[in-house]
Image (tube, grey):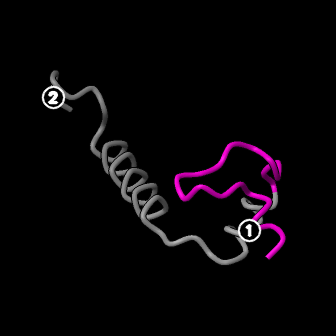
Amino acid sequence: MSPCNPLPNWLQFEANASVSNFNNFLQAIPSHEEVTAALFSMHPYKAAGINGFQPAFFQKT
């Protein structure tokens, strides 16, 4: 362990692995079930999105 790096080598490896796993999680394409759950958890008449539609439009189709 060097004075510049306070983390032991094994901990540094674990930190890098965790960042890599989290990065993979963020880049994953959401499943149909995840998108449906997110859509139906929204209040139907909240402000319109960038496409101009409120969540109610998608919840009823």
Q: Residue at x 81, y 61 (%)?
A: 40
Task: Tell me if residue 49 is in the magenta stretch.
Answer: yes
From the image, which quarter does the C terminus lie in?
A: bottom right
Q: Residue at x 63, y 76 (%)?
A: 31
Residue 59 found in image quarter:
bottom right
What percent of the width, then of the height, locates residue 50? 52, 52
- Residue 2 bears which disc, if any? 2
Nearest the eye: 53 or 27: 53
Specify the amino acid type for callout 2: Ser
Specify the amino acid type for callout 1: Phe
Query: Which residue is disc 1 drawn over?
Result: 58
Q: Is residue 46 above or below residue 25?
A: above
Between marks 2 and 1, how big is the CA–CA gap?
A: 56 Å
Give the extent of the magenta segment.
Answer: 41-61
Q: Is residue 14 left or right of residue 4?
A: right
Using a 10 Å C-alpha cutoff, classify the residue at mark 1 as few (fewer than 14 neighbours), some (14 to 19) or many (20 or more): few
Local SS, label 1: helix
What percent of the width, then of the height, locates residue 21? 44, 60
